Amino acid sequence: MARAATTSDVFNAVADVHRREILEVLGAGERAVGDIVDDLAIAQPQVSNHLRVLRTVGLVNCRADGRRRLYRLQPEGLRPLRDWVSPFERMINDRLDRIDDYLGELQRRGGGHGT
């Protein structure tokens, strides 16, 4: 049952380090399985299995080029991750803005002493 969750959910699919590495490789452009194997030093059957999972959740596309299959990142498939992370990103940015404001206030109070 855990396997079904992995193959149907973007969050579980990207939880695997090898799948994230494959996504990084594909972020640079379309690649054949053999190229991914060479880049990551992962056995071809494992790469193929990871690509199958990534295709199932909509993170990669595949097209035929003669006898080769070329895989390409589908960035829109990452939308659930982006949507989930977005509130945390806003929270972090708000905190950084407050720190920046505080440091600016400290500089104004110090009047440039010590420089």
Image (cartoon, rainbow, N blue to C red):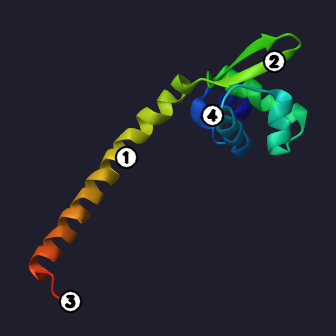
Q: Amino acid under label 4?
A: Gly
Q: Residues within 10 Å of mark 1 (few under 14, many from 20)?
A: few
Residue 111 sits in quarter: bottom left
- Nearer to us: label 1 or label 4: 4
Q: CA distance from mark 4 to mark 3?
A: 48 Å
Q: Residues within 10 Å of mark 4 (few under 14, many from 20)?
A: some
Residue 71 sits in quarter: top right
Dots 1, 3 in contact, CB < 8 A? no
Q: CA distance from mark 2 to mark 3?
A: 64 Å
Dots 4, 3 in contact, CB < 8 A? no
- Tag 3 or tag 4, which sits nearer the N-term? 4
Residue at 79 percent across and 11 percent down: it is 64
Q: Residues within 10 Å of mark 2 (few under 14, many from 20)?
A: some
Q: Amino acid under label 2?
A: Arg
Viewed as shown, does residue 78 lie left or right of 32?
Answer: left
Task: From the top left corner, tell me how far across and down residue 36 is, in percent.
Answer: 80, 35
Identify the residue position indicated by label 1 in the image. 89
Identify the residue position indicated by label 4 in the image. 27
Identify the residue position indicated by label 3 in the image. 114
Residue at 80 percent across and 42 percent down: it is 39
| SS of the residue under disc 4 | helix
Q: Quadrant of the C terminus?
A: bottom left
Q: CA distance from mark 2 to mark 4?
A: 17 Å
- Of residues 80 and 63, the one drawn nearer to the viewer in this rendering: 63
Q: CA distance from mark 1 to mark 3?
A: 35 Å
**Badge number at residue 19:** none
| SS of the residue under disc 3 | loop
Identify the residue position indicated by label 2 in the image. 69
As drawn, the residue found furthest toward the front would be 115
Dots 2, 4 in contact, CB < 8 A? no
